[in-house]
Amino acid sequence: MPNLAIIGAGIMGANHGRVALSTPDVTVTSVCDPDPQRAATLAKAIGAQYTTDLDEALADVDAVILATPSETHGELGARILRSGRDLLVEKPIATSVADARNLIDLAEKHDRVLMVGHVERFNPAVTELLQLVDDPLSLEITRVGPFSNRALADVLLDLMIHDVDLARTVAGSEIVAHRAATRIVRSAEQDLAFALLMFENGMIANITASRVSQNKIRRVTLTQRNDCVIADLLRQQVEVHRIEHSEFLSEGGVRYRQSGRVEIPFLSQHGEPLMHELRHFADCVVNRRRPIVSGEDGLAALEVCLQIRDTALVG
């Protein structure tokens, strides 16, 4: 069981601490934050020590969860990897391609685990959906919710980056072209984004990300030649719509009917995605495994989101 430090005691750091407290594979022994009161509050809640000094936090730990603001990931992540500690860095891996590549190079140089916190990869509904991928034609992903004052980054790096990573995983192929539109609504950054991604293997993904919606929705619809898989990431439920018969009901194909059956698979795992993510990170640290979401995966999603931001039609 590795000893972990949480760097950053904000919302995500507190979430990691809360989940780690009830996860047998993980022990957090140190919390670090520049705000001593915030560090002390989280440390007390999970039975850890606290400090405002990064080097002190790294002294007696095997690995680190980096949950600081995104713009600090490049600098702090580099210090952590150079210290010889394994690293789970919250998404995005960094805010620039150069910083992301530097983290990947440092992890390789120092033989360290580098994992990126694209937590939806560990959602039980996503785990089930990935097992059902056969002949993907199209993917529709909706990730929308009400506006939050804690939103600091644009919606591309805050929300859509999860789904760019997920789309790459479903396709098993790289993105060769994209089109996008974004809009600033309530903040100084883009709050609404639409992206159409085209993959080398022919799959198309249509992604909607919004933090100005009235409802919170997290839904993935995968269309294949013989079925359609719908995953509700909030309810952690998957439906498989299998086509068994189709026919034209009128000459010229004006009327059309198809029939089949709906299956609701029993998920192979349940529980909070963050718990599965932390357990996987601990396993990678102990058994020196390559993470499901590697530094290279984090870089690939970051590159696409930055390109979208730079080329999108902005409203």
Image: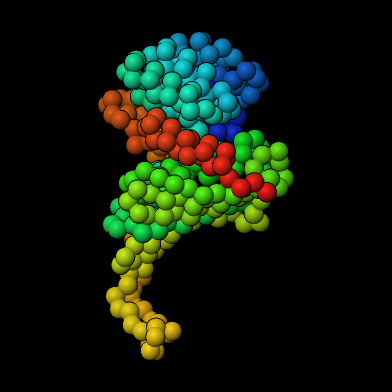
Q: Position of residue 19 (x, y in %)?
A: 48, 36
Q: How is the image coloured?
A: rainbow
Name the residue: 30% across, 78% down: 245
The quadrant in which the N terminus is found is top left
Camera-side residue: 70 or 68? 70
Q: Find residue 237 and report its image quarter.
A: bottom left
Q: How many marks?
A: 0
Could you say where residue 78 lies in the image, as x and y percent from the top left? 46, 17
Q: Is residue 45 visible?
A: no
Q: Look at 47% across and 14% down and name the residue there.
A: 79
Quick check: can you spot residue 106? yes
Q: Quadrant of residue 226?
A: bottom left
Q: Is residue 181 depicted above or below 244 in this figure?
A: above
Compared across the picture, whether 44 is left or right of 123 comes to right
Q: Position of residue 85 (x, y in %)?
A: 40, 17
Near-viewer residue (21 or 90): 90
In the picture provided, is 160 more to the left or to the right than 199?
A: right
Which is nearer the eye, 203 or 112? Answer: 203
The residue that appears at 61% across and 36% down in the rendered structure is 153
Above or below — where is 213 with respect to 169? below
The picture quadrant where one finds residue 88 is: top left
At which x and y percent is residue 55?
50, 10
